[in-house]
Amino acid sequence: MSTPSVLALRRQLSARFPAAHAGRKEPESHHFQSLPPLPKATLSELVSPPEVTGLGLVLAELLAQSRGEEQTPPLALIDPGDHFDPASYSVHRPLLWLRAPSLKKALQAADLLVRDGNIPLVLLDCSLTPLPEVRQIPPSSWYRLRALAEASGTLLLALTSTPTLPAATTRYQLTSALTLTDMAALRSQWLPKVSFHPLRAHQSQPANMG
């Protein structure tokens, strides 16, 4: 992406999400009801195996977060493959939804947003991306994104179907005890049946970043 295009997008982000430039002190972690603390300035990975139900609940929780009368920080959702259906969610915070035709293009968008730092929480939804496509991404690309997140203070949260990201600083695996009977209950009654187990994350950096 050319420099003029980057500058133009930054101006659009600043105009659309002025609260992101407010300069007030933010907590060191993002906290959401029923979710584990998600540290800022990291590349984190949330693993949801295909046989586990509950990732949609997590996304709904993130989108529904509101601070009441206080301006809720914006969230960016990068959607490779165009799987997100906004009509299925109740969105109560400013949302930037970026659709990408491939994971490679999605990572280019993530690079721009994380580098810019104006949106504190960026979701990269790889949960439905074919695993071979995810594994084609070189490790250096993930380490680059982690370094950008550490520099800008952004939390880049990648949603995956299996532990994949070599550069993840924090990694959780989603488990749930939901049954078909639970589908008739309110969403607030589902959340207690969803849990998150910390997984070992790779902290080392490759010798050659490419």
Image (cartoon, rainbow, N blue to C red):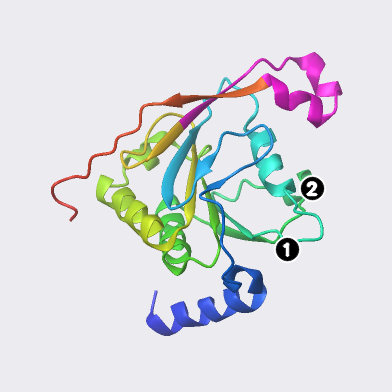
Residue at the disc numbered 1? 71
Question: What is the crowding at mark 1: few (fewer than 14 residues within 10 Å), some, or many (at least 20)?
Answer: few
What residue is rendered at 13% in x and 47% in y?
207
Pointer 2: what residue?
90
* Image position of 85 (left or right of 40): right
* Residue found at x 74% / y 47%: 64
Which quadrant would the N terminus be assigned to in this image? bottom left
Tell me whether the residue at label 2 lies in contact with that at label 1, contact meaning CB atoms closer than 8 angstroms.
no
**Which residue lies most toward the bottom here?**
4
Q: Is residue 21 magenta?
A: no
Quarter in which the C terminus is drawn: bottom left
Q: Which residues are magenta?
A: 172-193
Nearest to the observer: residue 131 or residue 165: 165
The correct choice, above or below, for 102 with respect to 203 in the image is below
Q: Residue 86: image x %, image y %?
A: 73, 51
Q: Earlier in the sequence, mark 2 or mark 1?
A: 1
Q: What amino acid is labelled 2 in the image?
A: Ser
Residue occupying image coordinates x 45% and y 38%:
45
In the figure, residue 188 lies in which quadrant?
top right
Q: Mark 1 falls on what kind of element?
A: loop
61 left or right of 171 in image: right
Q: Quadrant of residue 67?
A: bottom right
* Magenta stretch: includes residue 184: yes
**Alpha-carbon neighbours of circle 2 within 10 Å: few (<14), some, or many (≥20)?**
few
Instruction: Give the percent coordinates (x, y) of residue 127.
Output: 52, 37
Residue 50's place in the image compared with 102, above or below, is above
Residue 131 % position (x, y)? 41, 34
Q: Which mark is residue 32?
A: none
